[in-house]
Image (spheres, rainbow, N blue to C red):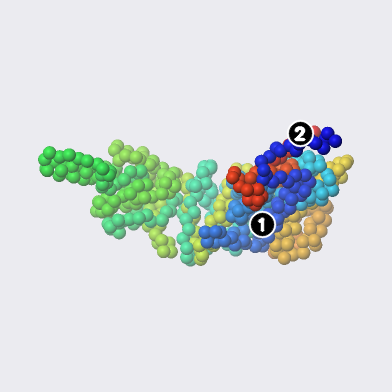
Amino acid sequence: MASMMQPQIILLKEGTDTSQGRAQVVSNINACTAVGDTVRTTLGPRGMDKLIHDDKGGVTISNDGATIMRLLDIVHPAAKILVDIAKSQDSEVGDGTTTVVLLASEFLKEAKPYIEDGVHPHSLIRSYRTAGNMAIQRVKELAVSIEGKSLEEKKTLLAKCAATTLSSKLIGGEKEFFASMVVDAVLAIGNDDRLNLIGIKKVPGGTMRDSFLVNGVAFKKTFSYAGFEQQPKKFLNPKILLLNIELELKSEKENAEIRLSDPLQYQSIVDAEWNIIYDKLDKCVKSGAKIVLSRLAIGDLATQYFADRDIFCAGRVTEEDLQRVAAATGGTVQTSVNNVIDEVLGSCEVFEEKQVGNERFNIFSGCPSGQTATIVLRGGADQFIEEAERSLHDAIMIVRRALKNSTVVPGGGAIDMEISKYLRQHARTIAGKSQFFVNSFAKALEVIPRQLCDNAGFDATDVLNKLRQKHASGEGANYGVDINTGGIADSFANFVWEPAVVKINAINAATEASCLILSVDETVKNPKIGLTVKEAKDSTLPLQIAHVQTIG
């Protein structure tokens, strides 16, 4: 009787919505599986594209996992974790973003029956972590190094990696053309890690084949004043002066006040202004520079002054382009024109202004430092060029990673099938429930070759049976899906390669994300301040609580 009279304990604010227990874990798994199903069809060379229409009327066509995940605007708190792993995969290695989302959703899908049957999530988490570590170890064992090759051999190998990445993109039809361009661009910047040293400029019109690589810097002609057309548009071995100052007459700041006792003094003030600007321009000319670039404006007076002296000038050059010119030509950006010495001037073999489509480009080629490159992209529609830029970004990242971590693994689902076989064999040596969980992890890895077949319109069951048989024989570790014939083929011999770091990162991130989602067993939605209970229930301000236990 006493227990019946105890008052109810209220811990959370009125209107707080809580969901917990097994149903909550299953609900989170369902949400993540739905996200995986969204990007599933974009995987591989025969993957479909998604057209995303945002609230501002912008249209994006893409099959890049990270781009799609970013634009989907997912509100489910557990599913947002998949968005985060796609972003981290994109920033870390640049490719494999669809793979990582697909793997994570498949790991959770395989775990769902066990959760529904009453298995504790931490039993699954423990087995998944063990299986994930073993899978990564196996990838490292199977990886082939491209270290110690000659430059020509290395360029060929890197081009194969870039072509594998580009084959699943919108520009896959011209993958060899763009792959060699990407490799040349990455090798041009040397060991420098700054991705912005490779500029990508987009010019609508023409065909993809009209795209070209500049071993140096190219940027769109900036705003110019009268007198610009009288300037020379081509130089051989010019000296280049880079500035961060204005070369124009400036009006006084508002509310500036000058008191004069004699009207003649006014003329001396005007003359002083002109003398200052002419002094600056004289110093630029005396420096010996034939090209003057400034981040700030170069006015009409300065433009005409330089034109009369056969000097080319461009003002309002963007910070990024100016820094790339500095890196390529060996020049230093100056904040003053006083004491300009030869050491701060840049140089290049050829400077010219060229017409590209409807735009005019200033092109610096044959740069001594050579630590920058520019890809000028051509194409029909704006959306197409945007997607081509995203595709090239992925390829550039992949080539950089392959250069740094010079090990590659076979693509086309070959490495996934080999790890799956390895884990299945290991599972047989485990006593207890863990055997089922490791087996499920191994089965989930088969989603990559299965989805490659589905997206290409092949019979996935038939192809996977052939792959299992080949890998089980012990001689088919490099065999994956042959997209062209619908059978199986040696991915290594067909040059379908990807850097080992892509696979390692994808398995690692997918395992961590699935373990994190499995460890969440309660969701608390806090009401907005000042809302009624009904409004609070409709609102979505989610806060997730993970019950973390020590795994023995």
Look at the picture and state if 433 lies above or below 161: above
Please state which of residues 545 and 434 is positioned toward the viewer in this rendering. 545
Q: Earlier in the sequence, mark 2 or mark 1?
A: 1
Residue 245 figure quarter: top left
Residue at 12% over, 43% down:
263
Q: Is residue 112 left or right of residue 186?
A: right
Picture coordinates of residue 196, whole percent (x, y): 49, 47
- The amino acid type, in three-letter code, at marker 2 is Thr
Give the position of the C terminus as an image quadrant.
top right
The residue tagged with tag 2: helix, strand or loop? loop
Q: Are marks 2 and 1 in contact (CB under 8 Å)?
A: no
Picture coordinates of residue 533, whole percent (x, y): 65, 48
Q: Residue furthest right?
A: 431
Tally of numbered discs: 2
Say which residue label 1 marks: 39
Residue 432 figure quarter: top right
Please state which of residues 320 and 526 is positioned toward the viewer in this rendering. 526
Label 1 neighbour load within 10 Å: few <14, some 14-19, many 20+: many
Say which residue label 2 marks: 550
Please state which of residues 507 and 75 is positioned toward the viewer in this rendering. 75
- The amino acid type, in three-letter code, at marker 1 is Val
Picture coordinates of residue 164, whole percent (x, y): 64, 55
Residue at 18% over, 45% down:
270
Label 2 neighbour load within 10 Å: few <14, some 14-19, many 20+: few
Look at the picture and state if 70 lies above or below 46: above
Residue at 67% over, 45% down:
15
The residue tagged with tag 1: helix, strand or loop? helix
Residue 73: mark? none
Q: Is residue 425 left or right of residue 267?
A: right
